[in-house]
């Protein structure tokens, strides 16, 4: 486990304190779960971006191959 210093805006800190008190959850546990959730959301965003880019590349390649097949059919 890593130890780090964290600076939060007062408003964010106060809101987190209210929630952790209401849920009877340790502040550290709450922040760990929040960062874990945020990491998962961003991993999905990055994956979506990567898949979109790769899909575009495959689409272009597929269209080129389709055009080549059509040219071959037209020659016959």
Image (spheres, rainbow, N blue to C red):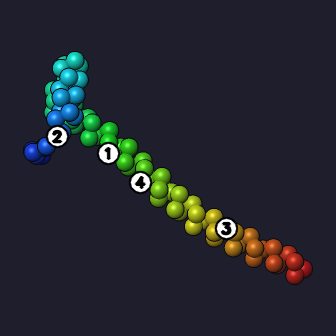
Q: Tell me, for residue 75, which label it has, or none.
A: none
Q: Decide which of tag 2 and tag 1 comes sooner along the chain.
A: 2
Disc 4 or disc 3, which is closer to the eye?
4
Q: Decide which of tag 1 and tag 4 comes sooner along the chain.
A: 1
Q: What element carries label 2?
A: loop
Residue 3, quarter of the rendered image: top left
Q: Decide which of tag 1 and tag 3 comes sooner along the chain.
A: 1
Q: Decide which of tag 4 and tag 3 comes sooner along the chain.
A: 4
Question: Where is residue 11 shown, x and y percent of the image?
Answer: 20, 33
- Left or right of 72: which side holds 62? left
Which residue position is annotated with label 3?
A: 62
Which residue position is annotated with label 1?
A: 39
- Give above or below for 32 relative to 57: above
Residue 50 versus residue 69: which sits nearer the camera? 50
The image quadrant where one finds the C terminus is bottom right
- Give above or below for 48 relative to 40: below
Question: Residue at image x 17%, y 40%?
Answer: 8
Residue 29 showing in the rendered view: no
- Give above or below for 72 relative to 56: below
Circles 4, 3 touching at the beta carbon (< 8 Å)? no
Q: Is mark 4 on a helix, strand or loop?
A: helix
Task: Give the Cα distance between marks 4 and 2.
Answer: 26 Å
Circles 1, 3 touching at the beta carbon (< 8 Å)? no
Residue 71, quarter of the rendered image: bottom right
Q: What element carries label 1?
A: helix
Which residue position is annotated with label 4?
A: 46
Q: Which residue appears farthest toward the bottom when viewing the image?
A: 75
Question: Where is residue 70 shown, x and y percent of the image?
Answer: 81, 73
Task: Give the Cα distance between marks 1 and 3.
Answer: 34 Å
Which residue position is annotated with label 2?
A: 8
């Amino acid at each position: 486990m890593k130890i780090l210093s964290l600076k939060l805006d007062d408003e964010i800190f106060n809101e987190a304190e209210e929630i952790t008190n209401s849920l009877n959850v340790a502040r550290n546990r709450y922040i760990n779960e929040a960062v874990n959730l945020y990491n998962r959301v961003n991993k999905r965003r990055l994956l979506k971006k990567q898949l979109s880019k790769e899909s575009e590349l495959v689409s272009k390649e597929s269209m080129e191959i389709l055009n080549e097949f059509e040219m071959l059919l037209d020659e016959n």
